[in-house]
Image: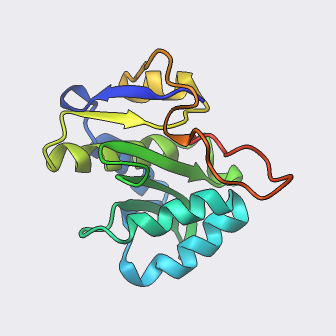
């Protein structure tokens, strides 16, 4: 689970990704504080308790550091930033039935563009699973010797699996 670095000043534009999803009836937007409970349940059900905990932290920020993809009042995916640490992107997840439509790339871009708007020059993608996805989507590069990175020593219950990658 390596980390990756993104040059926020050299990202693809956000609007084409959002427009393509709008054409499919998918809205990508900042999560509202009132949605914290529902999103937490969804993340726990589809991904992990670790990610649900990290999502919870994103709601402590003002503005909320979490974007969601929604169609017909149904959550399709989420992306968070400034959770693991300042300047970090992740976790991010898209439901299995919504993958392959550009939802993950749009959530990634929404978060990273928001970070750029907050004056970050670079973003770190923590604990990456699909390296190729991030290379293609935003030109991210692998940070050498970054495994296990910030997740070193993460507490787990006996028998609990290793922490999920932030894909």
Q: Residue furthest top?
A: 144
Q: Nearer the viewer, residue 118 or 101?
A: 118
How many marks on residues? 0
Protein image colouring: rainbow
Q: Is residue 97 left or right of residue 141?
A: right
Q: Tell me which corner region of the image, top left, top right, bottom left or bottom right, holds residue 164.
A: top right
Quick check: 100 left or right of 162? left
**Residue at image x 34%, y 61%?**
65
Q: Residue at the far bottom: name it.
A: 34
For this view, does 87 lie left or right of residue 22? Answer: left
What residue is drawn where x is 45% and y is 21%?
135
Rendering coords of residue 96 (x, y %) = 70, 50
Locate the N terminus and report the quarter of the image it occupies: top right
Question: Would you say 70 lies left or right of 148 here?
Answer: left
Residue 9 picture location, percent across and down:
18, 30
Residue nearest the viewer, comparing 66 with 151: 151
Q: Residue furthest right?
A: 159
Nearer-the-camera pick, 161 or 19: 161
Q: Is residue 150 above or below residue 74?
A: above
In the figure, 18 relative to 41: above or below? above
| Residue occupying image coordinates x 41% and y 55% | 83
Q: Position of residue 139 (x, y in %)?
A: 37, 21
x, y percent for residue 131: 55, 24
Check the picture and name the quadrant holding the C terminus: top right
């Amino acid at each position: 689970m390596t980390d990756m670095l993104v040059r926020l000043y050299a990202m693809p534009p956000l609007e084409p990704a959002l427009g393509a999803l709008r054409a499919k009836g998918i809205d990508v937007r900042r999560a509202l504080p009132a949605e914290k409970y529902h999103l937490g349940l969804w993340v726990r059900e589809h991904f992990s308790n670790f990610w649900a905990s990290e999502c919870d932290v994103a709601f402590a920020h003002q503005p909320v550091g979490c974007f969601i993809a929604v169609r017909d009042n149904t959550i399709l995916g989420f992306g968070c930033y400034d959770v693991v640490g300042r300047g970090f992107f992740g976790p991010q997840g898209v439901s299995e039935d919504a993958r392959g439509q550009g939802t993950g790339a749009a959530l990634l871009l929404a978060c990273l563009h928001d970070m750029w708007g907050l004056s970050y020059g670079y973003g770190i993608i923590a604990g990456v699973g699909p390296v190729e996805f991030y290379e293609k989507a935003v030109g991210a590069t692998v940070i050498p010797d970054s495994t296990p990175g910030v997740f070193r020593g993460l507490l787990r219950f006996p028998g609990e699996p290793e922490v999920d990658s932030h894909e």
